Amino acid sequence: MALIVQKFGGTSVGTIERIKTIAEKVQRFRNDGHDVVVVVSAMSGETNRLVGLAREIQEHPAPGEMDVLLSTGEQVTISLLSMALQELGCPAVSYTGWQISIRTDSHHNKARIQEIDTEAVKKDLGEGRVVVVAGFQGIDECGRITTLGRGGSDTTAVALAAALEADECQIYTDVDGVYTTDPRVVEGARRLDKITFEEMLEMASLGSKVLQIRSVEFAGKYNVTLRVLHSFEEGPGTLITLEEQDEMEQPAVSGIAFNRDEAKLTIKGVPDIPGVASRILGPISRANIEVDMIVQNVSADQTTDFTFTVHRSDYQRAMDVLQKTCNDLGAREYDGDNKIAKVSIVGVGMRSHAGVATRMFEALAAEGINIQIISTSEIKVSVVIAEKYLELAVRALHSAFELDQEPVSGR
């Protein structure tokens, strides 16, 4: 018998029929003798509907009131799923985030979990009930409802699994696991049986949409075993763990991530003096624009060209800020490009394999794809390329690293 935390997202509970199907799945786990805690999101489309209602009244609704409004979506789902379980003869009880309670800080719309009181949950589990918890929400020290922001239900599930010392946290989605890359781009993409937290963190931060990065960070910090599974199809899914494969079996590259939502900005002919980088990026930071990749090149005339990337939605604001910076610094010119993409290879096997970056660059060169920016870490290499070559690049790299083949011992 194990204690399992299961999380179902909005599409998994998007209709009454799907909620009934999820209830049957949960009941099977309980009938097998497991204790089960279920975390659910709002039904698909419900959060957008609530946001729309708020904006019919206020263009910029108060964050605290938005949390009160948005938290009602999950409250609907927990009650419906509990009813569906009870209808099957499975004892179940629902809890909102503040009822159990999930204590957070007071940053509305993006609160962070500080503490979870598990007493009520443990009592119900001990009495044979399935516990159904609303994801995405909590309560601050003043008793105000808070929400956890994007991916909040995943974070709720992982945090509960950590607090309860669960044997496994299962994240159910509309895919049957983590793939070597997006199957919609590469037909031969392969589901991974296992991936490390390090690799999953990189994949999530670099564009993989399977798991939100906050939940992976939380799971890694508290050593919560994660498994990604399909909501409506049986299968082993992908296990996310701290354990690495044996070095002889570990491929150099485990997966390829990519992100289309990138934009590049460059300021040229900047005086090469101490502190110039902070004078360029300081105004960008104060405009609440996040910077990703950075490249600086010093010219023979003692000036520097400084290039950085931002999210594409921030492109025009960043260009406006850079125009003023260009004037303030007496730079020669500035320009930008919002038709770029980032492609990354990821794998803990890079630590023990030489020539991985060279192999990547050769594969791109063979397809006539020019690299604009390169960024590396111990287990990843990222490049910026023209967006029009994105899918070609992903397919070329997937083939170059033979990711459509099962790893072979000693390869």
Image (cartoon, rainbow, N blue to C red):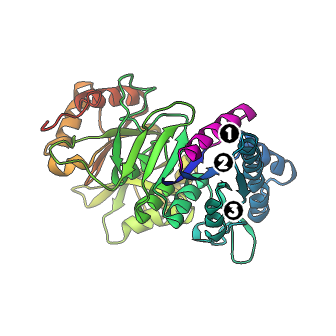
Q: Between disc 2 and disc 3, whose residue precedes?
A: 2
Amino acid type at circle 1 is Val
Q: CA distance from mark 1 to mark 2?
A: 8 Å
Under tag 2, what secondary structure? Answer: loop
Q: Which residue is mark 1?
A: 13
Mark 1 crowdedness (10 Å alpha carbons): few <14, some 14-19, many ≥20? many
In the rendered image, residue 258, in percent from the top left (x then y), is placed at 41, 39
Amino acid type at circle 2 is Ser
Whether the magenta-drawn stretch holds residue 16 is answered as yes
The image's mark for residue 41 is: 2
Residue at x-position 58% and y-position 47%: 30
In the rendered image, residue 44, in percent from the top left (x then y), is placed at 69, 39
In the rendered image, residue 278, in percent from the top left (x then y), is placed at 41, 68
Q: Which residue is mark 3?
A: 97
- Front position in the image: 150 or 368: 150
Q: Is residue 384 visible?
A: no
